[in-house]
Image (cartoon, grey):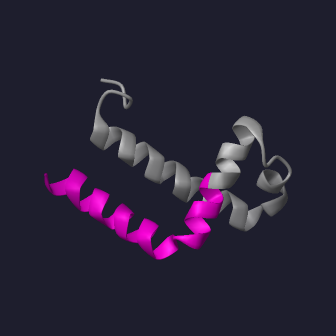
Amino acid sequence: MSAIFNFQSLLCVVLLMICTCTYIRSFAPSLLDRQKTGVIGTFWKMARIGERKSPWVAAACIFMAVNILFF
């Protein structure tokens, strides 16, 4: 089943994208900072969410990991 039709999978994909974009921006900031609009701008926005809301994103990742592993 596609992640679009399963809400739990969609949340997992979004969290992984936020974490991945934040990780990429920490090592190569110029890669995401060039394009702040359009489709690539979405990745820049996800990186900003990961940077500014990092305690909340970390808590959400832990919650999703427990949810996927045990439920």
- The vertical placement of 50 against 41, above or below, is below
Query: Which residue does the image show at 53% across and 58% down from the upper left?
Result: 19
Task: Name the quadrant containing residue 28.
Answer: bottom right
Out of 27 and 19, give the one closest to the viewer.
19
Q: Residue placed farthest to the bottom in the image? A: 55
Query: Which residue does the image show at 68% across and 58% down from the upper left?
Result: 24
Q: Is residue 15 left or right of residue 43?
A: left
**10 part of magenta stretch:** no
Count of number-bearing discs = 0
In this picture, which residue range is highlighted in magenta? 46-71
Residue 71 drawn at (x, y percent):
13, 51
Query: Which residue does the image show at 66% across and 47% down from the upper left?
Result: 43
Prevailing secondary structure of the magenta residues: helix
- The vertical placement of 4 against 13, above or below, is above
Quarter holding the N terminus? top left
Residue 69 drawn at (x, y percent):
21, 54
**55 part of magenta stretch:** yes
Residue 6 drawn at (x, y percent):
29, 32
Q: Residue placed farthest to the top in the image? A: 1
Q: Residue placed farthest to the left in the image? A: 71
Residue 54 drawn at (x, y percent):
51, 72
Q: Residue placed farthest to the front in the image? A: 37
Query: Which residue does the image show at 73% across and 41% down from the upper left?
Result: 40
Task: Name the quadrant containing residue 50.
Answer: bottom right
